[in-house]
Image (tube, rainbow, N blue to C red):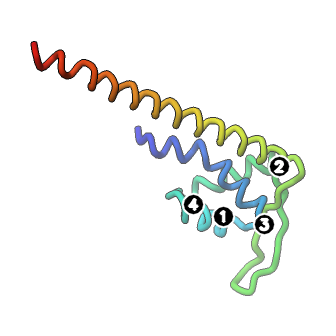
Amino acid sequence: MDINTQFKKGVLELCVLVLIQKNDRYGYELAEAVSQHIEVAEGALYPLLRKLVKDGYCTTYLQESSEGPPRKYYKLTPEGALYSQKLIVAWNDFVRNVANLIEQASSRANLDRFMFAPALSRG
């Protein structure tokens, strides 16, 4: 199991919502924007977008494109904006708590090595 892939799956929804909150976007544009920060397969994005629409967090509309057929744009609903803000708060809490855990564990491990290493070497 690729742990990095699991991290990406877990945070993709948040990334998409944050990008759509900034301005309406179409699928390929979202994939490009997310890929600037984390590597993600374009195919992973479309099921998520369908889910966000189904759950009422986004709506879609078609807009003509000078580069081909009309594009389907995704727009955040008021419920989606609220959900996005809740996810941002939860994400920031999660990241802070994990960082604290890592820092405390690292500090404790370094302290244990410092305190016990001389005793072991005298053995």
Residue 104: x and y in percent read: 46, 28
What is the distance, in whole Å, between disc 3 and disc 4 at their CAs? 19 Å
What is the distance, in whole Å, between disc 4 and disc 2 at their CAs? 22 Å
Q: Nearer the viewer, residue 89 or 35?
A: 89
Residue name at image x 78 percent, y 46 percent: 85
What is the distance, in whole Å, between disc 4 and disc 1 at their CAs? 9 Å
Q: Which of the 4 image quadrants contains residue 96?
A: top right
Circles 2, 1 touching at the beta carbon (< 8 Å):
no
Q: Label 3 belongs to which residue?
A: 23
Secondary element at tag 3: loop
The number of numbered badges drawn on the structure is 4
Residue 3: x and y in percent read: 44, 40
Q: For the residue marked with disc 3, what is the amino acid? A: Asn
Earlier-in-chain disc, 3 versus 2: 3
Answer few, some or many: residues within 10 Å of disc 2's Cα (few below 14, many 20 plus, some between 14 and 19): many
- The mark lying in front, picked from 4 and 2, is 2
Quarter of the picture containing the N terminus is top left
- The mark lying in front, picked from 1 and 3, is 3
Earlier-in-chain disc, 1 versus 3: 3
- The mark lying in front, picked from 3 and 4, is 3
Secondary element at tag 2: helix
What is the distance, in whole Å, between disc 3 and disc 2 at their CAs? 13 Å
Earlier-in-chain disc, 2 versus 1: 1
Q: Label 4 belongs to which residue?
A: 42
Q: Label 2 belongs to which residue?
A: 80
